[in-house]
């Protein structure tokens, strides 16, 4: 089974989108691509026609970029035909693409994607538009810019993927264990009389904490510290 990534971002609808087509695109896109390919999906929500904006989120098959590259095939081949025939589904999708293509409309997409197993963390920007191919019109994603980040707690917070309280182990937990089990305190601790850590030791502890965002308990962090 492929690793599962989590992604969220924004869409900026460029060109002369009328309200009817704006709403139609989002409705049909979601109907065809929301939770239709096993665990993987793409969904648009929180749309605002006046601003020409919406949010997009999904669960990536390895990565969300893979979802975007496959979305046209998924839309045609992974639809639940309980409410439409295969022919009706294909016709609905193709008519939508034809209307978007005739008006030369595009969508700019910016999103972040993360997957902890492979320590994958990326911010991507691209364009979604309808292009003519040998197989007919297709909804296509093109990557324009990409930034990869080190997979750590600081970056996960900075990219607004998680908040500090989402992580099991906090620095305060480490300080408590250092005091109780090792009789060690941080240099700015004025409440206890114990041996103080050096700046280098504090920095090392915080680096290990940052590099292991999903540590299950304090000992998962402290076991990485050679001098303890």
Image (spheres, helix red, strand yellow):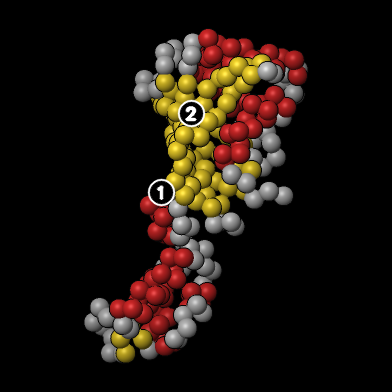
What x and y, as percent, mark residue 65? Answer: 56, 39
**Where 190 sits versus 162, above or below?**
below
The residue beneath circle 1 is: 159
Give the SS element for disc 1: loop
Identity of the residue drawn at 64% across and 40% down: 40
From the image, state whether disc 1 or disc 2 is nearer to you: 2
Quadrant assignment, res 76: top right
Say which residue appears at 30% left-offset and 78% top-offset: 199
Residue 127: numbered disc: 2
Q: Is residue 196 positioned above or below 8 on the image?
A: below
Q: Does 200 sit left or right of 109 as displayed?
A: left
Label 2 Cα neighbours within 10 Å, binned few <14 / some 14-19 / many ≥20: some
Q: Is residue 104 above or below residue 33?
A: above
Figure quadrant of the C terminus: bottom left
Task: Name the secondary structure under disc 2.
Answer: strand
Quick check: 210 left or right of 141? Answer: left
Q: Is residue 115 left or right of residue 18?
A: right
Q: Which mark is residue 214?
A: none
Q: What residue is at 71 percent from the left and 30 percent from the top?
A: 78
**For marks 1 and 2 on the same chain, the one whose residue lies earlier in the sequence:** 2
Q: Residue 163: x and y, percent? A: 41, 54
Residue 132, how many percent across, how many down?
A: 60, 16
Q: Residue at x 59, y 44 (%)?
A: 63
């Amino acid at each position: 089974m492929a690793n599962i990534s989590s992604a969220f971002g924004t869409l900026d609808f460029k060109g002369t989108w009328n309200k009817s087509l704006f709403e139609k695109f989002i409705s049909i896109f979601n109907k065809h691509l929301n939770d239709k390919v096993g665990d993987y999906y793409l969904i648009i929500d929180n749309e605002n026609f006046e601003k020409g904006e919406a949010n997009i989120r999904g669960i990536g098959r390895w990565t969300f970029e893979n979802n975007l590259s496959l979305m046209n095939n998924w839309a045609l081949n992974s639809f639940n035909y309980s409410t439409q025939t295969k022919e009706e589904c294909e016709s609905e999708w193709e008519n939508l693409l034809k209307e978007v293509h005739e008006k030369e409309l595009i969508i700019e997409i910016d999103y972040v994607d993360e997957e902890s197993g492979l320590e994958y963390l990326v911010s991507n920007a691209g364009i979604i538009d309808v292009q003519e191919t040998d197989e007919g019109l297709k909804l296509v994603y093109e990557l324009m810019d990409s930034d990869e980040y080190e997979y750590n707690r600081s970056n996960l917070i900075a990219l607004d993927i998680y908040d500090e309280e989402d992580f099991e182990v906090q620095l305060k937990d480490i300080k408590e264990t250092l005091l109780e089990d090792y009789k060690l305190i941080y240099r700015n601790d004025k409440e206890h009389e114990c041996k103080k850590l050096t700046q280098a030791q504090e920095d090392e502890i915080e680096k290990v904490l940052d590099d292991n965002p999903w540590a299950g308990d304090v000992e998962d962090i402290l076991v990485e510290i050679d001098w303890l």
